[in-house]
Amino acid sequence: MPIYTIGAVPNLEPTGTVISQFVELRITNTTAARLEPIVVNAYSVTDTGPEGIAETLNFTTTFGIAAPNGVVTLIIPTTVANYSITVSSPGFPGFVNDISLYAVARDAAGFIVFDQVYPFGDWNIIGPVLS
């Protein structure tokens, strides 16, 4: 099962003000089969110094996406200093990319935060792909 991430996203202005209030995450099924389960997790990320990074789960959901070309759009709150989002998909044998991901952060007024736009090419695979 592939697990995709955008990594840790800094979300504070130099003044200490949170930049984005939420992320719109669009997940598209690019196969001819229903995909289930799709698991989405969002974390608050804290740098703990030499000990590394601590992640606190802030949002989680599990669902299926119909085929072909089914789309699910989620609104994920991001009112934290740093956040990370992971998405896992079933990864059926022979499917290299069974989903496509696109995320865009928005500020309090609903405007796009251009430094926090993540097309599929910006997502990294961090988990094993089981087939």
Image (tube, rainbow, N blue to C red):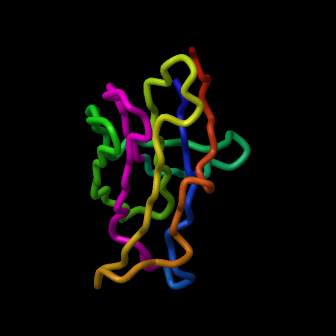
- Is 29 covered by the magenta stretch? yes
In the picture, measured across the screen, residue 55 lies left or right of residue 57, that is right
Tell me where residue 28 appears, x and y as whole percent.
38, 47
Q: Depth check: give the residue in front, 73 or 18.
A: 73
Quarter of the figure that contains the C terminus: top right
Q: Does 58 appear above or below 25?
A: above
Count of numbered marks: 0
Residue located at (59% from left, 50% from top): 123
Which quadrant would residue 107 be assigned to in this image? bottom left
Q: Depth check: give the residue in front, 13 or 99.
A: 99
Q: Does 20 appear above or below 62?
A: below
Which quadrant would residue 4 be assigned to in this image? top right
Tell me where residue 102 appears, x and y as whole percent.
46, 57
Tell me where residue 56 appears, x and y as whole percent.
43, 42
Give the magenta-colored segment's residue range.
Answer: 17-42
Q: Depth check: give the residue in front, 94 or 86.
A: 94
